[in-house]
Each structure stands twice: as structure tokens, then as C-alpha cells.
Image (spheres, rainbow, N blue to C red):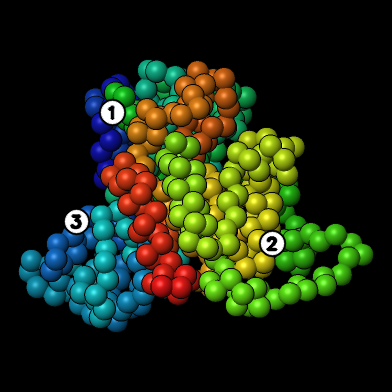
Amino acid sequence: MRNIPFGKPIIGDEEKRAVAEVLNGDILVHGPRAIEFETRFKEFTGAPFAVSVASCTAAMHLFYFYAGIGPREEIVVLPSRKIATVEAITTYDGQLPEAFAPQSVVLSMNEEIDVSRGDMIVRKKNLPNIGSRLEAIICWMDETASTMTTAYIMKHTTKYVKVHLNKIIYKIDVNTLHREAANTFLLNEIGRVEITTSTPIFFDHYKINHSTGSFILIDPVTNNTVAAGMIRGVPRAVGDVLEEGAKGDKIIIKSPHTVWGGWNISREVREGRNVHKAVVLWFTGYSGSGKSTISKHLENKLFGAGYQTMLLDGDNMRHGLCGDLGFSEEDRSENIRRAGEVARLFFESGHIVICTFISPFIRDRQLVRSLFPDKRFLEIYVKCDLDVCKRRDPNGLYKKAMTGEISEFTGVSSPYEEPLAPEIIVETDLQSVDQIADSLIQQLEQAGILRE
């Protein structure tokens, strides 16, 4: 049983029976200070094996199990995607032939793998969903109404992430079970929502795995548990449902009646003249993190040393090529797609292309990466605490976003998905601009991009 503290009991017996039907028979049992969810994993039911890391030491890893696992099984550690084989399962009483929920055990693996609290371990052939957008049924448990602008904290397994309620799809009348339109949730109300997380999470449908399919929401100011939820899956639109066999044909739409003619002078020839290799340095991070400041300083150093450079700045792109785009999720994706294609043109001309874009979504950055050869696209995560970025606020954008003057602003009303495995991480609240630029040049030299 999982206990979630909150202020008041939420529903009576009649409502419990009604809500039980809506939530697939999973009755919410109220108490004086808690809601309890029956996990149902004490007896293994065939749900996908999943483990959340609870704590780590140099000699062992402690795990909480959501389903069963045994020695000699191949597992994957997420988000690092490292693969290993379980060699032994140990507890205080000795080794076990298998482990299952709700045990806490020590796993010994055939390879040394870095594992941190909040990581997940799964079977290689039974991977969970990964994403930052999901649909869920939630029960609102706070006297303060829900808002679309608050960055709530989601506790999912052992991990905490910031989230936004993007959309209330409908609210459920617990008396009639009818669906109703709503803009907010009040105490005891239940409904279906779309949620966006600041970083991707690994999850399952609640029907498949109760532990990886459930979560709670916490108010960042009061620290109160404001909602409990069950994940339904990822949001889908009509455009996502394509005829069988058509999806692959619609990934990239090319202009009709055109023929690709290739490059007149190859990149390799241009690189020979430049005496350096072409590369794309993709700076990503919050507004105010220091992307533009670092990139300008870096370009000045590289250009002064005789290298061919091109700086593509997100703001400048939106004054021209992307001037017709707004800041909806679709427009942001198109903005990054266009930027990637422009970067590719300069890359093929042999340049060191420096790109500074918030580029908040992982899938968009992955699309751009796919345009370039291996080791020629370097994702540089300009890591900076969001509160520091808000204090800097060089153009006053955070202030406008927090007062509602700017909608869908990253870090306030729109999420930022941190890179899972960037080539380089720089921290502007810990390092000077000059230190970062010199470090980047050194890494380019070590990678063989620049002549030493």
C-alpha cells in the first residue's frame, strides 16, 4: 500500500462506487489523512518487470521491485540505456533465486554500470514508454483550484520532475459519470488531462503496471499533495492515426517534381582547404542560461584563429526565415527543423556551425542530429538553474511570461526536456564564459575537429 498524505478525506461510499467504475475498478479508499492505492504486486501478475533505484553506494545498489526478476536475465538501465545481466540477487538473509514486489534487494551485475537514484531497470525486451507528454486520469485533492501556469512537482516512482497541466480534456461527474468541459479542478474533482513533464520519464499504462503508471502531484510552494493520477498513455490526435503502411511515407514531405543534385564541391574538399573539419555545435538550454553569450565568445575566438565559422542564433532566425512562426509546440518544432536544414547547408560548405536555440523538445533535437554524420553533431547542454535564469532575465521575458503577457514560454508555461546524453555539458552559474569557451576549443582539438 502507498500512503499519500493530504488535508481532508475526499469521497464518500457512493462516490467511491461510481468512481470505481470510471477508474477500472481501482477504488480510492479515504482515511483521516491519506489515500491508499492497492499496488497488487505482492502476487506477481505478469506485469512488465521494472525497478526503481532507491539508493546507491560504491559496493551495492538497492532497488524497489514492481515485478519479478531472476539471475541470468538481461536488463537495461534507463535513462543511460546500458545493458547488463543479473548475476545475483542478495538480501540480508543471503542470495535469492528470484526477487519480486515489494522486496528491497541488492542486484549484482556482470558489468560495472553507473546507476543513480531515480533510474529504472527493465527487461531488455520489455521496455516502458519514454516521453514528456502523457494523458492521465487525476483526482484533485487540494482546496486550492488547479491552474495551467503552476509548475507542479510530479513524484513518479522514485523520481521528481516539474510538470504543467497543459489541458483538461474533460471532468467526470461522479454522480452521473458524464463528461463535462472544465478549465480547472476543485477539491475532490476527477478528470482526464494532458500533462507535460520538464524531463522525459519512463512510464507504462496504469492497467499494465500500477507503479510505473501512477504518480502524485505536489504544490511547489506549500509542499502539499494536490493530486493523484493514473497514466493512460501518450496524447494522440487524428493526424497520428495513419493508414497502414502510410506512416513511413509521411515522415518527410518533399517538394514534388524536384531532383536532388548533390553538392557541387564536396565537404571533404572544402575541409581540406579550411584545414579543419566541419562540425555543428548545438547549444540548448533555458532562455537566460547563457547560450548566446558563450557562442558569440566562442565564435570570436575561433574566427580570430582563422577558422571558418557561422553563428545561427534563434532570435535572429525568427526575424527572417522563421518570422512566420509562433511559439506553439508545432511552430517550435518547425522552427528547429528549418534551423537544422540551414545548419546543414553551412556544414556541407565546411564551416564550424554554432547554433543557439532553446530547442526544448528532445525529438526535435534528435531530428536535427539525424541530418549529420556521426561525431559531427555535438549537443552542448548549457545547464543553469531555472531560478538563476529567471533572475538574469536579460530581456524581461520571464517577467512577462509570469504575468501572462507571453504564453507558452519555456520554463514558465511550456516545458524544457533536458538532454539525456549530450556530448558536452557546461554550467554558466559555475564557470566563466572565457573558461567555457577555452574548454570547448580544447575538446574540439581533442576530437580532431581543429588543428592543434
- Give the quadrant of residue 209: bottom left
- Give the quadrant of residue 224: top left
Disc 1 marks which amino acid? Asn
Image height of 149 relative to 107, above or below? above
Residue on which disc 2 sits:
345
Given the current orientation, which residue lies at the most extreme left position? 93
Count of all numbered marks drawn on residues in the image? 3
Q: Is residue 130 left or right of residue 34?
A: right
Where is residue 37? Give x, y as percent: 33, 42
Seen at 32% across and 58% down, the residue is: 119
Residue on which disc 1 sits:
223
Query: Is disc 3 placed on a helix, strand or loop?
Result: strand
Q: Is residue 101 visible?
A: no
Q: Say which of 233 and 162 sits in front.
A: 162
Q: Say which of 430 and 265 sits in front.
A: 265
Q: Is residue 443 left or right of residue 396?
A: left
Where is residue 202? Give x, y as percent: 43, 55
